[in-house]
Amino acid sequence: MDIIGVSNVCLTLGKTEILKHINVSFEEGRIHGLIGRNGSGKTMLMKCICGFIKPTSGEIIV
């Protein structure tokens, strides 16, 4: 069972696309990690999931 679902999430700040069509699900009882280079959008994705920033498009279900 998924406890967090991210579906087709995009985030644009100014003219810069930060997140482009992100799709991921986090399952209950599992340990997950986000891995990527500096500036790849890991923190912005987490801010969207937590509700601190509203994505430009897409859906996040918690």
Image (tube, rainbow, N blue to C red):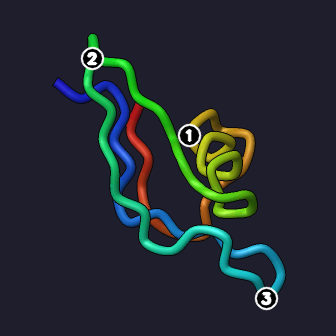
The reply to whether the C-beta atoms of the residues labelled 3 and 1 are less than 8 Å apart is: no
Residue at the (42%, 55%) spot, across then down: 59
Residue 37 location, quadrant: bottom right
Q: Nearer the viewer, mark 1 or mark 2?
A: 2
Q: Which mark is residue 15?
A: 3
Could you tell whether 10 is left or right of 31 in the image?
right
Picture coordinates of residue 48 (x, y %)?
Answer: 62, 47
Residue at the (67%, 71%) spot, across then down: 18
Could you tell whether 7 is left or right of 49 in the image?
left
Q: Residues within 10 Å of mark 3 (few under 14, many from 20)?
A: few
Q: CA distance from mark 2 to mark 3?
A: 36 Å
Outermost top residue: 29
Residue at the (51%, 74%) spot, across then down: 20
Q: CA distance from mark 1 to mark 2?
A: 16 Å
Give the mark nearest the N terminus, 1 or 2: 2
Above/below status of 62 relative to 61: above
Q: Which mark is residue 28?
A: 2
Tell me the residue that label 1 is attached to: 49
Picture coordinates of residue 34 (x, y %)?
Answer: 51, 41
Q: Residues within 10 Å of mark 1 (few under 14, many from 20)?
A: some
Picture coordinates of residue 15 (x, y %)?
Answer: 79, 88
